[in-house]
Image (tube, rainbow, N blue to C red):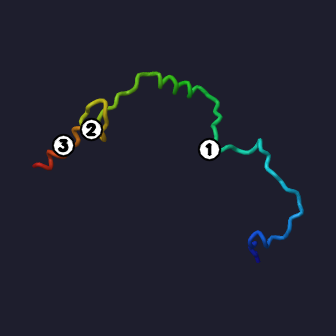
Amino acid sequence: MFVPLRDKPYWPPYDGPIIHPDEERLRGRGRPQVNRFRNEMDMMDDWLEAQPSHKQSCTFCGGHGHNKRKCSKRGEASSSAANM
């Protein structure tokens, strides 16, 4: 049977050694840094980033420089359909 410990005043006295963590081995706050070894695939990514970027094209109207979510003609089509 397991008997849980009560509050700290009810604990028996401890006479053993007090262990403190090594300050040098403690992790810092925040997300840990990633240690990566760059390979040929990373060099390809750098090459692709240096290439001219692909222009956005809208699947709704076919225009360039925006997408379907930001299309100005999308609101016109829905409002003209509502007027019919």
Spot occupied by residue 21 in the image (x, y as percentages of width and height): 79, 49
Sooner in the amino-acid sequence: mark 3 or mark 1: 1
Q: Is residue 7 left or right of residue 65?
A: right
Give x and y (percent) for residue 39: 61, 27
Residue 25 is left or right of residue 42, and the answer is right
Question: Which residue is farthest bottom?
Answer: 1
Q: Is residue 53 above or below residue 66?
A: above
Residue, x 14% and y 45% (percent of image)?
80
- The tag on residue 71 is 2
Q: Amino acid at mark 1?
A: Gly
Q: Are marks 3 and 1 in contact (CB under 8 Å)?
A: no
Q: Residue at coordinates 21% horizontally, 38% vertically from top-left?
A: 73
On the rendered structure, is 3 left or right of 58? right
Decide: few, some or many residues near mark 3? Use Cα within 10 Å; few <14, some 14-19, many ≥20: few
**Quadrant location of the N terminus in the rendered image:** bottom right
Question: Who's the residue at 86% across and 68% down the image?
Answer: 13
The one of 72 and 55 positioned closer to us in this rendering: 72
Element type at mark 2: loop
Would you place residue 22 above or below residue 6 in this image?
above
Q: Pointer 1: what residue?
A: 30
Q: Which mark is residue 77?
A: 3
Name the front one of labels 1 and 2.
Answer: 1
- Badge 1, how many Cα within 10 Å: few under 14, some, many 20+? few
Which tag, 1 or 2, sits closer to the chain's start? 1
Dot 2 alpha-carbon crowd within 10 angstroms: few under 14, some 14 to 19, many 20 or more: some
Q: In the picture, residue 77 is in which quadrant?
A: top left
